[in-house]
Amino acid sequence: MPDFILDVQGLETTFKTPDGIIHAVNGVSFGLKEGETIGVVGESGCGKSVTMLSVMGLIPNPPGNVAAGTAKFFGNDLLKMSKDEIRAVRGAQISMVFQDPMTSLNPVLTVGRQLQEPLTLHLGMTKKQAWDRSAELLAMVGIPNPQDRLSDYPHQFSGGMRQRVMIAMALSCSPQVLIADEPTTALDVTIQAQIMDLVKRLRDELGMAIIWITHDLGVVAGLAQRVLVMYGGFIIEEAPVNELYANPSHPYTLGLIGSLPRVDETEHKRLFSIEGLPPMLFEKPNQCPFAPRCKWAIERCWKENPALEPVAPEHRIACWVDVKTGRPR
Amino acid sequence: MSENNVLLRVSNLVKHFPIMRGFIQKQVGAVRAVDSISFDVKRGETLGLVGESGCGKSTTGRSILQLYRPTAGEVLFDGVDLVKTKGEELRKMRRKMQMIFQDPYASLNPRMTVGEIVGEPLLVHHISNEKETNERVKQLLELVNLNPSFATRYPHEFSGGQRQRIGVARALALQPSFIVCDEPISALDVSIQAQVVNLLEELQEKFNLTYLFIAHDLSMVRHISDRVAVMYLGVIVELATRDELYSKPLHPYSQALLSAVPIPDPMAEATRQRTILEGDVPSPANPPSGCRFRTRCPIAEAVCAESRPEFREIKPGHFVACFFAERFL
């Protein structure tokens, strides 16, 4: 598949803990096209963040270990690169925005100093050039008086403003790929709307591809073109965004969409709830990871883990059952 | 609305937290967390209280229960003014009103067993002896769909959703008529949120409970509430029945807040008109003069800075604090 700029195949990541080995990511494969926005959806512990951190070489080893897989970025495997090689990619061609803007900014350095760093490091700018460019970047993400704010410290910014700074920093070297790990989860809805609006505008202006990790199916609906749903370290459904919401085909996706109340809800009914709890991941499952919570589960689900198979054009699910008929597919 | 239908009447409730400074701890200002709000809660209904972080919604809940003593105002519960009661009398009133907290990890004592946690209110209020308490604890755990044998276990053995059920069981121990639910689901995963909300709804039907449901998730508030109040910077800006508020919000802040909520449906998202607010919420220590919302309001005029708009009943059951609300009728 030559048109993927980032092509991840068979990624597996484990963590060693005192209680045993956690299989956080169990063979994840996906591709990202140029300029495309994909949403990665799932609940806490489903492996969505760990997948992206593994691709970026940001899993600390020990306790973590990227045990298998490839992640080809323009043909070069990120997982096989040396520390220096991947450092040249990270921040320059692929950059990341994290959930909590307070802990991902350095509290003892001014915002200007932190914005300068990637510019001098990756683009070889002088300090003066980098300072001026930093001011432009702050202006681009909508921070008033950018020249003055450069010498402020992170605590002098509000949560939404800090996230804007993070976005400015991530985009400073015009990356081809932006990975956003729940960047609006810690923010209020009106501020979230501001940030989403900003990201959409910058995407249209700069044309980068985005991987947007979130647990909020609403956020993805308005932003992504394609969605991956993760559960227990696997991708269990993958579809274009309209198809996914109109026609969710994996029991977990179906439950997730059904368990959401809508702000434009008109009639009151009980929410659909998925009973039970997410899996613990101490063993690499040889059954469907969702089987214990699935009301459609058949015998085969307890014996074999289904692979991701197409059910419609560009729509793939990992399930033995057809939820429309309740019969094996 | 007949008078005895009202369980709780809050009138001109004010809660200021002093800001102290210097060696002698002189008061230099006050955080005006709640600044004169009034509303009624009817028997058996759920009143949703929404707003962004720092708007005073949790302070309102705690001031009603007298966990914070209000700076001024009246809280009439069943005709008794809680602000004026204290000591033994207040303790007796507390049996009728309970609270469910946001953080299921912080609100359960890690050194007590689940049985001790759920049974403690019964012992504190001398309602039953130890043997009866054990029986009652078992009943309560069954009520919230937990296995009664869990009574001997400790909180760390449970997941977030199960802990929140323990919190619910504790709140129900004294058979209260009124429960303040302070963001009871915001720390939980999406699929678990639906479980807890469905439980709250079942219990409400079973025991004719009255809820004050505090949350920032507008979709969930729409789902669970009969009426909804919107708070901004210490004041209630709008209060109406659920359908009225969500279909025809009259305050510019409610309008912006509702339009900022993402809808899990790409079709609806694509055609939506958004009002994106500029800037951040001002500090409650130094709120704007006149209308609190005027600094971010798209329709503010000179009069908004001069005087505070009255919280008035613009049509039966629909209250709004805006000079220009008629424009949106």
Image (spheres, coloured by chain):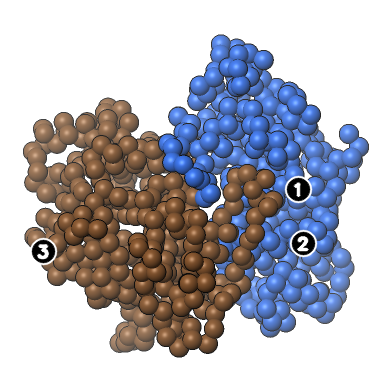
Chain colours: A blue, B brown
Q: Residue at x 45, y 75 (%)?
A: B322
Q: CA distance from mark 3 to mark 1?
A: 60 Å
Residue type, mark 3 in image: Gly
The image quadrant that residue A203 belongs to is: bottom right
The image quadrant that residue B307 belongs to is: bottom left
Residue that carries the numbered disc 3 in the rendered image? B87
Q: Is residue A183 above or below residue A302?
A: below
Kindly check if marks 1 and 2 are in contact, taking CB atoms under 8 A apart as contact. no
Q: Which mark is residue A37?
A: 1
Q: Nearer the viewer, residue A315 or A16?
A: A315
Does A318 sit left or right of A85 as displayed?
A: left
Residue type, mark 2 in image: Leu
Is disc 3 placed on a helix, strand or loop?
Answer: helix
Q: Which mark is residue A202?
A: 2
Q: Position of residue A161 (x, y in %)?
A: 62, 69
Evaluate whether label 1 is on the same chain as label 2: yes
Is disc 1 placed on a helix, strand or loop?
Answer: strand
Q: Position of residue B101 (x, y in %)?
A: 34, 52
Does B235 sit left or right of A286 as displayed?
A: left
Does B82 sit left or right of A300 as displayed?
A: left
Q: CA distance from mark 1 to mark 2?
A: 12 Å
Report in which chain the residue with disc 2 lies. A
Q: Residue at x 20, y 47 (%)?
A: B176
Is disc 2 placed on a helix, strand or loop?
Answer: helix
Return the disc, 1 or 2, that comes first in the chain's sequence.
Answer: 1
Residue type, mark 1 in image: Thr
For the image shown, how many numbered marks are present on the structure?
Answer: 3
Q: Nearer the viewer, residue B321 or A102?
A: B321
Mark nearest the camera among 3 and 1 is 1
Evaluate whether label 3 is on the same chain as label 2: no
Q: CA distance from mark 3 to mark 2?
A: 59 Å
Q: Is residue A140 above or below residue B6?
A: below
